[in-house]
Amino acid sequence: MRRHHLAACLSIALSALGADRVAAQDPVKIGLVMPMTGALASAGRETVDGAKLYMAQHGDKVAGRTIVLIVKDDATMPDNSRRLAQELIVNDHVDFLGAGSTPAALSMAPVVTQGKVPTVVMISGTSVVTEKSPYYVRTSFTLGQQSGIMADWAIKNGSRKAVSILSDFAPGAEAGKVFEQHFTAGGGQVLDTLKVPLANPDFSPFLQRAADLKPDTLFVFVPAGQAGPLARQFAERGLNKSGIKLIGPGDIVDDDDLPGTGDTLVGVVTAGFYSAAHPSQMNKDYVAAYQKATGHRANFISVGGYDGMHAIYTALQKTGGKTDADAVLAAMKGLSWESPRGPISIDPRTRDIVQNVYVRKVEKKDGAPWAVEFETFPNVKDPLKEEAAK
Ligand code: PHB
């Protein structure tokens, strides 16, 4: 006890000599602006659950400073995201922000840049987002990372005529674009691209329209939280027995929804960066701890929050608790670590995530469906940024 007390006194005395005296005694505030309600509510919940699990496992002290998490609900409305980010910067003096969906991250970017606040993008899957502020670092994913690999796999496995069904917002457009580039380059044809409203989607008419075009393959992107309704309506139309192959990025077999889809999605192949069935020990521990803490299965969105906190904690360790944006960004660029999804890193040039993309097939294990990985593409960068840099 006494030795601890002495050590604590010494470290306080030492830090009092430093320039950051006041800062070192203040807590580090992290403001997460997330869609806790509205069309992307499931994504907001999973991100915050992931972030909180990280804190529960790693404590709330980093480099001598206490970490305080502030969660604000933007209700999936980008105007709210910008206002809440502004309030968090001006009133709460946050040291870090967490940004959510693509529309929210686009809306917040000028405020983040003006306020010089290091911000971890934890949900958005659209390439351009990280270019909208020099203080953005992404721990989520891009749709391009997954959709090109999906198209190549489909071509290799005999698909030639596809129809795309895409949720009508930026990540959907990006998934469709990269899929079509690769699919047509491989000699395939995209017969039509159908766009489904983001909020309260009714997939039935789009599925029917797609089936009428008699494709061999259906490429679908729906965001987190919509895999359940998609699977149900897919089966209601009899499409799971039609011989048309359903493929897509990992979002369509979201582990949040998968347990409730019965046999409907069994056999569906996707290209994704995270599955709760990823066989590493770290992921087994993560899935068990997550289930215990939240009562549901960890999904691809949750790791963006979990790893986002890791990026913040590690950067603070490297800066010795300093939070000025330039020091934090320098600390985050080039970070690499093991995530429950596998090895990941932050590309120092683009501040975007580099991660494995896995080709997975839904299989039943112990009575429940899981996306089981069978092929790995290591260290995949965002293809749109790589293409632009050529
Ligand atoms: C996004 O906002 O870019 C986004 C949201 C949910 C997803 C994928 C992308 O499942």
Image (cartoon, helix red, strand yellow):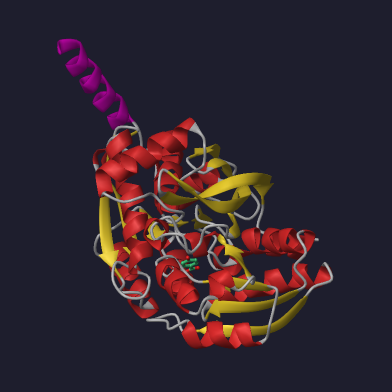
From the top left corner, tell me how far across and down residue 351 is, in percent. Answer: 58, 53
15 drawn magenta: yes
From the top left corner, tell me how far across and down residue 134 is, in percent. Answer: 55, 60
317 drawn magenta: no
Which residue occupies the extreme left position in the image? 2
The quarter of the displayed image where residue 183 is located: bottom right
Q: Nearer the viewer, residue 118 or 381?
A: 381
From the top left corner, tell me how far across and down residue 125 is, in percent. Answer: 54, 64
From the top left corner, tell me how far across and down residue 187 is, in percent. Answer: 84, 71
Is residue 319 visible in the rendered structure shown here? Answer: no
Q: Residue at x 59, y 46 (%)?
A: 373
- Residue 98 vertical placement versus 203 (above, below): above
Q: Nearer the viewer, residue 335 or 96?
A: 335
- Residue 5 vertical placement versus 245 (above, below): above
Specify the quadrant that holds the C terminus: bottom right
Specify the quadrant that holds the N terminus: top left
Q: Is residue 1 left or right of residue 168?
A: left
Which residue occupies the extreme top position in the image? 3
Q: Nearer the viewer, residue 13 or 335?
A: 335
Is residue 2 visible in the rendered structure shown here? Answer: yes
Q: Residue at x 50, y 88 (%)?
A: 205
Q: Residue at x 50, y 58 (%)?
A: 135
Q: Residue at x 27, y 51 (%)?
A: 69
The quarter of the displayed image where residue 227 is located: bottom left
Magenta highlight range: 1-17
Which secondary structure class fits the magenta region best? Answer: helix
